[in-house]
Image (cartoon, helix red, strand yellow):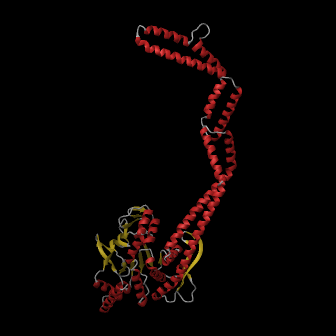
Amino acid sequence: MLTHLRIENFALIDSLALDFAGGLNVLTGETGAGKSIILDALDAVLGGKVSAGQVRSGAQRAVIEATFVMSGALAEWLAGQQIDPLGDELVVVREISGKTSRARINGVLVNQAVLRELREGLLEITAQGQSLQLEKPEVQLELLDNYAGATPQREQVRQAYESLQKRRADLARKKALREEQSRQLDLFRFQYEELSKADLDDPLEEEQLLAERSRLAHAVELQQNSQKLYELLYEGAGGGESAVTDLLGQASDLLVQMCEFDASLTSFSEMIDSALVQVQECARAINRYGEQVESDPEALQSVEKRLRLLKNLRQKYGPTLANVIARYQQLERDLALIEGGEESLEAEQQLLEGELARATELATELTRARTRAAKRLQSDLVRELAPLGMQKVRFAVEVEAARLTASGADRVIFLWSPNPGEPLAALTETASGGEMARFLLALKACLGAADHIGTLVFDEIDIGVSGRVAQAVAEKLLQLGSSHQVLCVTHQPLVAAMADNHYRVRKLVQSEDGEERTVVRVEVLSRTEARRDELAQLVSGQAAAEALEFASALLAEADRRRTHR
């Protein structure tokens, strides 16, 4: 619901602030007084087209600010747009400057598309020759669903359809992957067999083989050097040279003699004895090693062959042997996935068919609800239109089969014939401005509280009607005011009398900096006398006695109707 509208430097308005309440809000005033400018500003702040010519002459920019009461649906929408709430209010500001304009929602800069999306849940403007929403087939479909009370069913269809689409996308992706993998299957199998034959399991095998190759390639040298080393350590080399163990034995004897004179040398003696034992053990181990080392050309050839194989595999599948082993393990998994893929795809296909059947079933149930509601809406709307001067109108709601979407499997078309003998045709193609305005008024009366739009704006929809029709229009607007906030610009005293809140719009000429300028002013008519005088002006153009008496009667009757609505 709109609670506050502030307008600065827009068209003839220099500065204007209006507070609005629920129910039926009526704006009256002479032709050209500026009533429609206020509605134009409301249209502009919610994404309507604007131009530099709408900025008040002499001003740099125009600013329009609209404040609405927050609702649960608005809070969800703001969260989806990542816009923080401002308590229980939503504030939209639009600035117009030259050829550009900027808009903010709760202080966050937004584009026109976001504004228009917000508008669809907040406000609808209906004027002679203007219908902002009803031309869209999806809006007609939603109106029928609201009338049918089928919103929960529609939500079930939406959820089932989105799940179905996700399943379809997943299956398509898996099929594409399957096709790609199938093309690679022969390559995968060749690589797997090649790596399988290599019998790879140790990422350090190549380092171990290099060590083995070095040992085998130098077996003779190792044997010879082992013998020399043994002789140096234990037996003594040729030429009468003493072995290391002999020298250590001699050193030990000397230390034993020295310890007889200085006991502090005992630790050195122990160290020499320990070294002697270790050298003896080392010498024996070297001797055994030399006896075991043998020259084996076949073993060396086998190691060389294995190293060449591993090098080749590293060049093809990875810089290290660990990479090669990882590739082998991945190929094993890929082949298992590909070879078992057919069963997986069949299972996915069965799940998809199940979800399709579920979504189709829900859409069929929704179609039945829409078809039943379409028949009721046809009769209800014709009945609502009759007192609005359209007694001969024919109206039909066609529910046609369509491709399954998130909103069901139907396409809805509103058809009508306002004149006897004329065939039914699409509503938006044949209805005049006045007919469309009255049609929407009747439609909103049929929808009642089911219509999710909070604020309905009607701009002079009663032009060209009088008497009983004008009274019927007034009663319909009062009825709508029970479930919506209604803003209505009117010249009809019968409509203005029904107002819960009455605003008089006037155009004045005042002096600004020595120049005369035209401005728009709005007065809230809260006193009965002020409202009576305004209605009398609407009746006769002057506050004559008969007009005042008639205006008083209208207000009394309106009070009675509001009491019993």
Query: Is 123 or 332 nearer to us in this picture?
Result: 332
Res 138 visible: yes
Name the side, left or right, on which 520 lies relative to 136: left
Res 319 visible: no
Question: Is 294 located above or below residue 8 in the figure?
Answer: above
Question: Is 473 located above or below residue 141 in the figure?
Answer: below
Q: Quadrant of residue 524?
A: bottom left
Name the side, left or right, on which 131 lies relative to 516: right
Residue 462 in the image: state x and y as whole percent.
42, 84
Query: Is 290 or 348 nearer to us in this picture?
Result: 290
Tell me the residue at 52%/87% (across/down).
393
Question: Is 47 located above or below residue 202 in the figure?
Answer: below
The mark total stands at 0
- Figure quadrant of the C terminus: bottom left
Q: Quadrant of residue 108?
A: bottom left
Question: Is 539 located above or below residue 112 in the figure?
Answer: below
Tell me the residue at 69%/40% (across/down).
197
Query: Is 438 or 500 nearer to us in this picture?
Result: 500
Kindly give the residue lying farthest to the bottom in the view shown. 546
Q: Quadrant of residue 17?
A: bottom left
- Figure quadrant of the N terminus: bottom left
Residue 354 in the image: state x and y as whole percent.
60, 66
Residue 364 in the image: state x and y as whole percent.
58, 74
Residue 174 in the image: state x and y as whole percent.
62, 57
Kindly give the residue lying farthest to the front in the view shown. 260
